[in-house]
């Protein structure tokens, strides 16, 4: 699946997107955040406060308990403010 990173999440990881194949036990967005945070220092830094990270699956905002099975694209971004 394709994973996209936006704003300071992208800056901390050092890339805008990548294609990954997480292990079978990674079933939800929350699981994916946990797995990604173990992939290196930049990922650990980006996901150090997982409750502030927002996610979308195939361009639909989702909660951390959302299943990732069948997702083509998952995006991670910080909270945004309007203005």
Image: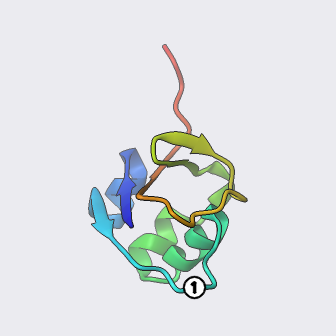
- Residue 31 location (% of width, % of height): 64, 72
Q: Quadrant of the N terminus?
A: bottom left
Q: Is residue 44 above or below residue 77?
A: below
Task: Find numbered disc 1 in the image and state the secondary structure of the residue it sits on.
Answer: loop
Which residue is located at x 54 percent, y 25 percent? 81
Which residue is located at x 63 percent, y 84 percent? 25
Nearer to the camera, 3 or 51: 3
Residue carrying label 1: 24
Nearer to the camera, 27 or 34: 27
Q: Is residue 81 above or below residue 3?
A: above
- Residue 62 location (% of width, % of height): 63, 46
Q: Is residue 47 above or below residue 53?
A: below
Q: Is residue 72 left or right of residue 44?
A: left
Q: Is residue 36 left or right of residue 53?
A: left
Q: Is residue 36 left or right of residue 8?
A: right
Which residue is located at x 51 percent, y 63 percent? 70
The outermost residue toward the right is 65
Q: Quadrant of residue 20?
A: bottom left
**Label tally:** 1
Q: Is residue 4 left or right of residue 26?
A: left
Which residue is located at x 46 percent, y 47 percent? 58
- Residue 45 location (% of width, % of height): 49, 68
Q: Is residue 53 above or below residue 79?
A: below
């Amino acid at each position: 699946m394709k994973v996209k990173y936006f704003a300071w999440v992208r800056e901390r990881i050092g890339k805008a997107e990548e294609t990954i194949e997480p292990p079978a036990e990674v079933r939800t967005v929350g699981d994916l955040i946990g797995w990604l945070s173990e992939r290196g220092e930049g990922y650990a830094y980006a996901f150090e406060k997982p409750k502030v990270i927002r996610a979308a699956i195939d361009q639909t905002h989702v909660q951390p308990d959302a299943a990732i099975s069948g997702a083509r694209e998952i995006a991670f971004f910080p909270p945004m403010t309007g203005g």
